Each structure stands twice: as structure tokens, then as C-alpha cells.
Amino acid sequence: MFRLAVFVSGRGSNLKAILDAISIKYLNVEISAVFADKRECGAVDLAANHNIPVYFVSKIFKENYILLEQASDVLINLKIDLVVLAGFLKKIPDNLVDHFTNKIINIHPALLPSFGGEGMYGMNVHRSVFNASCKVSGASVHFVDKVYDNGKIIAQSCVDITDVKSPEEIAARVLEVEHKLLPFVIKKISENKITIVDNRVFILN
Ligand code: GAR
């Protein structure tokens, strides 16, 4: 079975979307572990409710936390095929990217390469999109490289935001497409249907 590790920091709605896709057999994968950078969050509760082992990670030494720099050893031991960043807000260390080149994906709540980079997460993104008076936004799933939100884009979904009155409305519209886009990309990767040719990512039918 294709083995996922899902990295989380928050509410866990994308983790739930993956779990739902597994339960309806859209995805033929297993979530072997969840990695979280905080103990108290919806995503950790969700993992616990599904009996998924949770590993706590930190950038600095903390009792009962694994150093993020050492997470690659755990991932290798767990024979993880794909690391999914589903609302994980810490930067992935270079050594992890080296060990898992093109095996780490991230979902971002905007149409990259716009509205990405350090500090661009969650509502910060939607506020910037709102304040720029954008007429479309969307979600991007991309490979993770050593620069924030910079890796090759695998798939994107757009939403019309011409009529929105608040950043929260943008967030709600984007989240809806995130929950379809992330399972879709995981499915294609798990079926070996993603290729990179001349620096562009192609998804096979
Ligand atoms: C999602 O909107 C995800 O795209 C975003 O955090 C949210 C997590 O929600 N990620 C980023 O902003 C990363 N730069 P969730 O915990 O409900 O899945």
C-alpha cells in the first residue's frame, strides 16, 4: 500500500478530505503517520480519532518532540512514499527535501506563484488577495523545494471571487476546491501518473 505522512499545524480539514477520500475508496493509500508542530489542534484530534500515530516536530529542542531536521530518519523508517503538507506552516529543512525530492507536496490557498512565500499562509493569503481586488483565486498543489512555495506546480483550481465581500468568503470558496484538489493529486502520484518533462509537470489520465 502507498504510504503517506501528512504534516499539519491546524484545523485539519485537508487531512479530513484525504481520510474521506480513503474511506470512499477514491484513494488507495494509507496515512501511516501524522506529523504536527503543536499538540492542541483539530488535525491532531482527527488523527487520534482515526488511530493514526502522531509525531510532534519542532525546529528547536523540546521534550517529546522530534527535531524537524531528524524527521527524515523517521519517514525513512516508516517507508513513507509521499509527504503531504496539509496546512503545515513550518519551513521544511533542506535535508528533508534532499531525501524526498519530488516526494513532498504542499497545498497552498492561492494561485502560485502569486501570493506565496514566507508569512503567506491561511488568512494572510486571502486578505492579500482581497486587498489586491483579485477577481480569481484558487488553490495550488506543488512539489516542495528549498524555497517557500517555489517548487513546480502540479495542479491548480480556480474560483471566481468577483462578488466577494470579505477575505473570509474567499477562504471558504478556496477551501472547497482544496478538498478536491489535494486528494486528486495524491491519487495521481500514488498511481504513478505524474511526470516531469522539460521542467513541466504533466498529469496522465
Ligand atoms: C489550508 O487552507 C491550506 O491551504 C493552508 O492552510 C490551511 C489549512 O487548513 N496552507 C497554507 O497556507 C500553507 N502556506 P486545514 O488545517 O483545515 O487543512
Image (cartoon, rainbow, N blue to C red):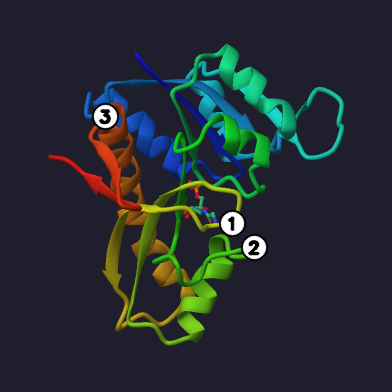
User: Residue visible at 41% across and 53% down?
Assistant: 152
On the image, the x and y values in percent for residue 186 come to: 33, 35
Asked whether 169 or 72 is in front, the reply is 72
Marks 2 and 3, the one that precedes in the sequence: 2
**What is the quadrant of the C terminus in the image?**
top left
Q: Which residue is mark 1?
A: 148
Q: In whole angstroms, how far apart are the C-alphas of marks 2 and 3?
A: 31 Å
On the image, the x and y values in percent for residue 40 come to: 69, 37
Q: In whole angstroms, how far apart are the C-alphas of marks 3 and 1?
A: 25 Å
The picture quadrant where one finds residue 77 is top right
Q: In whole angstroms, how far apart are the C-alphas of marks 1 and 2?
A: 6 Å
Q: Nearer the viewer, mark 2 or mark 3?
A: 3
Dot 1, how many residues are within 10 Å of its Cα: few (below 14), some (14-19), or many (20+)? some
Dot 3, how many residues are within 10 Å of its Cα: few (below 14), some (14-19), or many (20+)? few
User: Residue visible at 51% across and 58% down?
Assistant: 150
Question: Hey, which residue is sitting farthest front in the picture?
Answer: 198
Q: Which residue is mark 3?
A: 192
Mark 1 and mark 2 residues within 8 Å of each other at the beta carbon: yes
On the image, the x and y values in percent for residue 2 come to: 36, 19
Q: Is mark 2 within 8 Å of ligand 1?
A: no
Q: Which residue is mark 2?
A: 118
User: Residue visible at 31% across and 33% down?
Assistant: 189
User: Residue visible at 72% across and 26% down?
Assistant: 70
Marks 3 and 1, the one that precedes in the sequence: 1
Mark 2 and mark 3 residues within 8 Å of each other at the beta carbon: no
The three-letter code of the residue at mark 3 reads Asn
Q: Is mark 1 within 8 Å of ligand 1?
A: yes
The three-letter code of the residue at mark 1 reads Tyr
The three-letter code of the residue at mark 2 reads Glu
Element on which disc 1 rests: loop
